[in-house]
Structures are given as C-alpha cells and as structure tokens.
Image: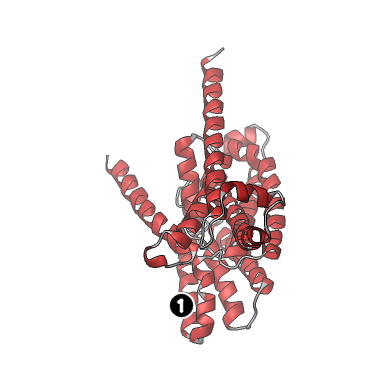
C-alpha cells in the first residue's frame, strides 16, 4: 500500500466515524426536541407514537405540534449547511456564505416587501423570498464577473449588496404599521414557530430535488479546488461547472430562507467546523452540522432561556455565530501578521 492510498484510507475511516457520531448527535437532539416541552413524553411513549401506537394526546402533541417543527429544522439546517459549504469551497473564502454576502438578505427584503407593501401572506411571501434570493445572487454574479469569478471580488460585491439590503429593510420597516412590522420581523431573523405539514412538504420537495444535484456535482467541485488549469486538464468545463454549483448553492439557501427565514450564521459556521473534523470539502459533515445547529438552537430558543422566554431560532444562532465571526477575523489577522 502506498503512502497516498494509506492516507486516503485513514481519511475515509475518519470521515465515516465523524458522520456516524454526528448522526447519533442529530438523533439524540431530535428525540429530546420531540419529547420535552410543556408536556413531556417518555421515550417509550414517543417511539410508540411515531409508529402509530400512541394515545390521542401524545399523537396530537408529537405528530401535529412538534414533529413538523423538528422536520423543518432538519431541512433548513441541511440546506443552509450544504449551501455554505458549497459557496466557501467553490470560492475559496471562509466569508463566502449566503448570509454574509446578501443572498438571504435579498430574500428577506423581497418577503418584507410582499408583506408590508403588497399585503401578501403564506406561500406567496415564500415565493417572493425565493425569487429575491435568486435576483440578488444573479446581481452579485454579474457585478463580480471580470473574465471569470474571483472569490474575494464575489464576497466584496456580496457584502456591499448585503448592506444595501439592510438599508432597504430599514426603510420598509420605518414606513410600515407597527403591527405589520411585527409579522415582518420573522423574515429578518428566521423562525420555526407555527410550522405546518404543508410547509414542510413544500420545503422537502424543493430541497429534495437539490440534494441529488449536489451529489452529482460534488466530483467537479473537488476538481475545481485543484485550480482552473488543472480542472480543464481533467476535462472539466470550468465556467459551466462553477455556474451550476453556484446555482445549486443559491437555490438551497433560497429554499431554506423561503421556508423559515434567514436563520443567521448556520451556513457560515457549518463548513469550517466540518473541515476541522474532516479535512477537505466535507459536504455531508457540513449538512449534518447544519442540522445539529438548527435543532439545538431551536430547542434552546424554546426551553433553555431564563424566565421561560421564547425567541425565534435565528436570535440564538446569531448569538452563537457572531463570536465565531470575530474569532475568525482575529485568527486570520494573527496569521497574516505572523
């Protein structure tokens, strides 16, 4: 066995171990999310309810109230985690995350515009959010194009558009009625409260179509990370592959934002954490860490705050992600100065 093949074997074994541990963590947090609340369900009763053998009360609480919310948390975490890992791997920049470069902010502006100006609600607002994310992503791509896409230019243009989106959100809120503005705030922070099965079904269809596309494009992503010239030498159509990967990443972020709003920093932190556990692209660990982050943050937002206070899940992820961003900037500066 050569040194290279031995290293690959060790990496695969480590990746399988990390994925197995993350899966166990996701299952544990999901079970706690379904069982714990104002009315606690024992684990045997929870398992019986999930297979259709529970009492009427348990079925209502678990299947009608908690399971849709937990399922949506899984879908949103998966989509944000994958989207962030794709952006950061493709553009070679840890700041290239859809929530930092304005894509989710564009979705928020579009959704808030639909609520406050057009008076829309329900799936129409989600549709506006999806389209808003696509429009902003297209604008970033066109404005950053200079005979190709460079990661730093894409990020700088995206950050500029994110500031413009925040200004637009502020303008819309200052012109709105206070009661309408309260409903629009959900689209600024992200929330899983009141999730219904029909909303879960729509999100599952859109994200379920995109995940196989990521699997098909993953080999091209790994070749693009070797450099454009090397990738062309391996037969990859560089520009087309990059556009397809960016399109899938944008669609994942747009689908999740249209379903639950812009849950902050999940896309930003999932990829770097996964790469520390498993060096390389690490798409599957990134998705699992995204799921684990959203599930844990949603549980904390419901049950762990002092005084029984409940807040949208996006406030909890923002509180986690902001210190991580500061640490990332500080450590990058230290490496530069060294």
The image quadrant that residue 212 belongs to is: top right
Neighbour class for label 1 at 10 Å: few (<14), some, many (≥20)?
few
Nearest the camera: 37 or 155?
Answer: 37
Residue bearing the label numbered 1: 170
Q: Closer to the camera, 291 or 101?
A: 291
Q: Is residue 272 left or right of residue 283?
A: left
What is the quadrant of residue 230 in the picture?
Answer: top right
**Nearer to us in this view, 245 or 310:** 310
Residue 337 lies left or right of residue 119; in this view the side is left
Q: Is residue 175 above or below residue 198?
A: below
Using the rendered image of the protein, determine whether residue 143 is visible from the camera's viewpoint: yes
Q: Is residue 85 above or below residue 37?
A: above
Residue sitting at the far top? 1
Q: Residue furthest left?
A: 338
x and y percent of residue 183 in the render?
54, 77
Q: Residue at x 56, y 40 (%)?
A: 23
In the picture, residue 57 is in which quadrant? bottom right
Question: Residue 21's spot in the image, x, y percent?
Answer: 52, 36
Figure coloring: secondary structure
Q: Is residue 314 left or right of residue 213?
A: left
Assign a secondary structure to mark 1: helix
Which is more toward the observer, 284 or 291? 291
Q: Residue at x 65, y 32 (%)?
A: 234
The image position of residue 45, as x and y in percent, is 62, 50
Q: How many marks can you see?
A: 1
Query: Is residue 159 visible in this depiction of the protein?
Result: no
- Asked if residue 298 is positioned above or below residue 13 in the image, the reply reads below
Residue name at image x 46 percent, y 44 percent: 272
Give coordinates of residue 164: x percent, y percent.
Answer: 47, 71
Task: Please state, as top left, top right, bottom left or bottom right, where the N terminus lies in the image.
Answer: top right
> Quick one: quadrant of the C terminus?
top left
């Amino acid at each position: 066995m050569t040194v290279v093949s031995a290293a690959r074997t060790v990496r695969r074994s480590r990746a399988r171990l990390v994925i197995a541990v993350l899966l166990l963590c996701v299952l544990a947090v999901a079970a706690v999310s379904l069982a714990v609340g104002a009315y606690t369900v024992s684990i045997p009763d929870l398992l019986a309810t999930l297979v259709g053998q529970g009492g009427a009360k348990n079925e209502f609480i678990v299947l009608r109230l908690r399971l849709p919310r937990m399922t949506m948390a899984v879908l949103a975490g998966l989509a944000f985690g994958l989207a962030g890992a794709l952006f950061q791997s493709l553009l070679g920049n840890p700041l290239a995350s859809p929530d930092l470069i304005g894509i989710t902010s564009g979705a928020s502006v579009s959704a808030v515009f639909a609520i406050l100006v057009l008076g829309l609600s329900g799936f129409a607002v989600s549709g506006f959010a999806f389209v808003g994310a696509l429009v902003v992503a297209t604008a970033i791509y066109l404005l950053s194009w200079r005979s190709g896409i460079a990661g730093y230019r894409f990020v700088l243009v995206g950050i500029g558009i994110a500031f413009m989106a925040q200004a637009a959100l502020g303008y819309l809120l200052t012109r709105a009625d206070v009661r309408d503005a309260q409903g629009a705030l959900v689209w600024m922070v992200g929330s899983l409260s009141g999730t219904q099965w029909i909303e879960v079904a729509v999100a599952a269809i859109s994200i379920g179509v995109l995940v196989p596309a990521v699997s098909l494009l993953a080999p091209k992503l790994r070749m693009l990370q070797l450099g454009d010239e090397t990738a062309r030498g391996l037969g990859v159509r560089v520009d087309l592959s990059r556009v397809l990967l960016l399109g899938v990443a944008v669609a994942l972020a747009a689908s999740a934002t249209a379903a639950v709003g812009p849950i902050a920093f999940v896309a930003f932190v999932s990829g770097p954490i996964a790469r520390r556990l498993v060096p390389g692209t690490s798409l599957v660990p990134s998705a699992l860490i995204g799921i684990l982050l959203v599930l844990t943050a949603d549980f904390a937002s419901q049950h762990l705050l002092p005084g029984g206070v409940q807040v949208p899940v996006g406030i909890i992820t923002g509180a986690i992600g902001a210190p991580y961003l500061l640490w990332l900037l500080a450590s990058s500066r230290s490496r530069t100065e060294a």
